[in-house]
Structures are given as C-alpha cells and as structure tokens.
Amino acid sequence: MTQMLAHREDAQKAWLDLFASITGLPIGLFEMHGREPLGIFSQGSLSKFEPHCQLIRSLPGGLAACETDHCLRARRALLQHGNELTLCHAGLYNEAVPVWVRGEVRAVLLYGEMQIDDQEYQRRSLEQHEKAVARLALDEDQAAQVRALLLQAKSYTPDNLQQLRITLPKVEQWFYGFIDQEELLEQHLEKVSHELQTRLQAVIARAENMMLEARDLSSEEVFRGTNDLLSAAEAMGTVVQNLRQSVGEYHFQKERIAPLLYEAKRIYETEAKGRGISIRIDLASADGSTPVLEVSRYHLQNALNNLVHNAVKYSFRPRSGRPRTVNIWGRPGKGCYAITIENYGVGILPEEIASGDIFADGYQGKLTQGEYRTGSGKGLYFAKRVIDRHRGRIKASSRLMSDEADREGQPHLNQFTIYLPYEQSKEGSAGGEDDCMD
Amino acid sequence: MAKTIVWIEDDTDIIDPVVRPLELAGHTFIRLRNAKETLEALDRIRQADLILLDMILPPGQLDREFGRYPGLEVLRELREVHGLKTPVVVLTVVTREEVQQQLRALHVADIVYKPVRPSELRKRVEQVLAAGS
C-alpha cells in the first residue's frame, strides 16, 4: 500500500513537472488529508517559483507564512468547489481549480504566481503585498527588494487566464481517472477479501471446535457438525466462483432440478437458522414427477446458491414470534420451467430493477447499504450470466409491504423468478423470448 | 471469572462459532450488529467488561456517514464523546496501516486478524480481561 502511494505521488509530480515546463508556471496539487490540505510541488514546479516568492520564502518567517497561506487558500477552494482567482498573502495571484471525479472534488490545483494586467487587480496586489511586508517585519532594503520583484512578476491578461482555466481541469481529470480506478480496485479487493475471510473464519472456527470437542460428541452431533462445516466450505466455494472472470466450460445434460435446490438449501440452512429463518421448497410439475431440465449442473448450482443466499441474507429477522421463511417454488410453463425464490426483507428500488442495475457487476442495492456490508456485489451478476447462458431469463420484483413513502428499512416482498428452458437448442445458439414464456 | 463481552459484528450468523470457547468458559455475550445499534446501546456497553469489535460494519441507517470503517468511527465516538474506557479487542480482516495507527491512538488493547482459531481468540481475549482486572 505504501508503495502504491509513493508510485502515485511520483506520477502526480511528473504531471506537475510537465505542466510547469509547458506553461512556465509553478503549480501545486492539494488534497485533504484528515482535516488539513496537503500540497505537492514537483522539483520542476519549485524551480518556476517567481523570484519574488523565492525571496519571501528565504526570509525569516517567510516560508511558514507561504505554506500556511497555500493551505488556507487550498482549503477554501476545496470547500467552495468553484474556480477562483486567489490572491496570495504576498500579493501575487493564483488560480485555484478544483478537480472533480465522480461528482466529488478530490483535489485542487493552485498555479500561477502572477500579476493581472488590470488596474484594480494591481491595486489589490500592492495592498496585500504591503500587509505581508509589515507582518514579516522587513527592513527597508528587504521591503524595496521584494517590491521590485513583485512589479517584475509575469503578467497575464484575463483572456490568457481563461485559456488555462479551460485546458487544465480536463488534463487533471484524466489523471484522476486513473487514481479513481486504482482506488475502486483497492476497495473492491477489500470487499472481496472481507467476504472470503469471513467465510474462511466460519470454516476454521467450526473445524477447530469440532476437533476440540470430538471426544464428547454423539454421532448425531458429529454428523451435524461436519455438515455445518461442509456447508461453510461450500458457501466459500460459491464466493470464489463468483469472483472468477471465466466460469469454465458448460456441460449440459438432463438433470432433476430438485437436488440442486435442496443443495442450496442445505448450504445456507445453518446461516438461515441463525437468523431465525426457515427455507421451504415446493416444486410442481405437469405430470407430478420431479422436473427435469437440460442444465449445466455446476454452473446452475452456483447460480441457485447465490439466489438462495441473497434471500436468506436480506431477510428481516423474525419479530414477536412471527416466523420468517424463504419460499422457493417451481411451476411448469410453456417450453420452460419457472423457479421463484421469495423472501421478506430488505427491498430493491423500482429503478434498480427497471434499469437492470441490480444485475450489474459489483452493484449493491441502495436499500442494502444501511444494513449489510458483507458481499462483493457479484452474486446476481454471476447468476444472470449463468441463466443467460442457459437461454433462460431472470426477473425480479420487490413489493413494498408498508405505507411508508421512504423505502429505507421497510419490509418488502421480493421475488426472483428464473425461467429455464427444458432443453437447450441443438444448434447451440441462444434462443429468443418465445423459448421460455410464462 | 465469567465476564460480559459486547461483540459488535454484523456476520455473527456466519462466524458465531469463533466465540464458542469463550461462551463455554462462561462468558456472556451481547451481540450488536451495526453502528446504530451500538450507539443506542451505551448503557449495556458501559456494563460490559470488554468490547470485541469489527471494523467493517453496516451503519444501520443511511442519514449519517460513517466512512469506510464504521467500526473505527463507532470506537472513536465511544471513546471521545462518551468517555468509555472499556478494553477493546478488534477482530477484523482490515490490515491497513493507517487504520492500525488510528486504533492504537484509540487505545485498543489488541488487534486480532480473521481468520483466527477460536482457541487463540479465547486466549487473546482472556489476556486482555485479566489485564483489565
């Protein structure tokens, strides 16, 4: 992590150098670190400091005054969010340009050290300069020197400034786009690590407890304990599967669908019981037999695991003796079989369903964010990929079960229905909607 | 001697077995699942002998920002706003250096990284409880 930060700072300084060498202007980059802005100036940038500024910085109290002044102006610019022409403590002008990334101001650029070719600006510059001279208690010679250098500082017209204002933020946004992606990746890795480590913790804890208590356990307890351990390991396997870019070759063959659903139930039953939730399965078929579909068992099993786990994870816990159930039922349709997984708990916003966002890679529903943290946002994305590959469809609905206008924290009846064709096309190409109808 | 431990963790449904040896040793657990629940349970927390805390927690409500590590913000509030001096053992997957520094500044007694064996967790927690006594 420290290496990444150092690498990032090197890249930022290289960019600042580039700007300074092209424009001849010194430039600093300021980000908030805790409560204070922290600035970076590259060597190339420092070498472009006006002689006026270099002299001020070399005088007693001058460097501290400059750095404090930089921070104050940077903090103001970070909070105010707009471009601003700022006047430094010693009378030169700087542009403050906020850098926006994903709707947020991530940093501010201060560049310039210039005079403005305008009477009023020059009057204010001199006024500010005199105040600095007084604060730093300069003697006559020093005061005369810095004043002379102030008047010799490079001068820009308002038009020149406008040109720089247009160009600079675009370049910086491009740069911050990379920073942003880096940070998103880091956050994603942390989420994934958290999910895996949590599952691994369950496996290790169960395993050691069984080992230490083995002598005192009945055979029934051993059976239950090893079943729980197996479930914990398989739940972890589902998480790992979700993370893979490539999910392996699909092997379609005729399978009874019931065992896959009962397996998903077995894996998450202990976790469900811990939350006071039971899982119920009811599968119907046209002729009373167990439904048989042409599926890739390994992939569909993982998809169903994800759907059942989500239903358990986002169910509200029972209150006042009211039991909570995750209901799974199946019914035959024309050319396909429909499996619905229903729960009562955290909802999904209508716009998230309408847009398909809930099936996007890494997406976590807005209504889950207050209540739940474990999860990488991969489960539904993975499930949809598998169902698409099966030439099936997945539909979601989430009905608000209270009168509250604000859905946050309110109970919803959620249903995920997957429609799977009985048979895959012999040509192997994806079928149309008619292949699987309600 | 049996103690009361507040466990602030949202995944107890999954990792509850990690505290089994502590429960078998007679310690009592109060389980709190998110930041909101924790900050509303101050009276119960004050009675506890130790806090076992995760960094990654749900906020429990969306009208307040808790940042990336709500557990850290909760601990800061318990220490700095409510003056709580209860010993804290952090049980977490988060290993970031800046988080460790902030935890030390908030006087956590120990930081245990997941996954941990239940027997090891018991040892570390009981060491802190003994030191507290």
Image (cartoon, rainbow, N blue to C red):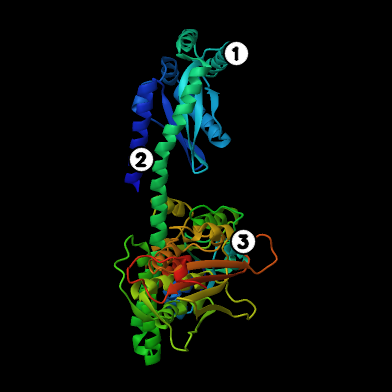
Callout 2 touching callout 1 (CB < 8 Å):
no
Q: Quadrant of residue B59?
A: bottom right
**Residues flagged by tags 2 and 1 on a common chain:** yes
Q: Residue A77: percent from the left, percent from the top?
A: 54, 32
- Element class at badge 2: helix
Task: Please name the amino acid that badge 2 sits on.
Answer: Arg
Callout 3 touching callout 1 (CB < 8 Å):
no
N-term-proximal mark, 3 vs 1: 1
Viewer-nearest of discs 2 and 3: 3
Q: Nearer the viewer, residue A84 or B71?
A: A84
**Would residue A64 be seen by someone viewing this image from the given angle?**
no
Q: CA distance from mark 2 to mark 1?
A: 41 Å
N-term-proximal mark, 2 vs 3: 2
Other-residue count near label 2 (Cα within 10 Å), few / some / many at <14 / 14–19 / ≥20: some
Which residue carries the number 2 mark?
Answer: A8
Q: CA distance from mark 2 to mark 3?
A: 38 Å
Which residue carries the number 3 mark?
Answer: A408
Q: Residue A397: percent from the left, percent from the top?
A: 56, 67
Whether residue A333 is situated above or below residue B69 in the rendered picture: below
Q: CA distance from mark 3 to mark 1?
A: 54 Å
Which residue carries the number 1 mark?
Answer: A120
N-term-proximal mark, 2 vs 1: 2
- Element class at badge 1: helix
Q: Nearer the viewer, residue B92 or A98?
A: A98
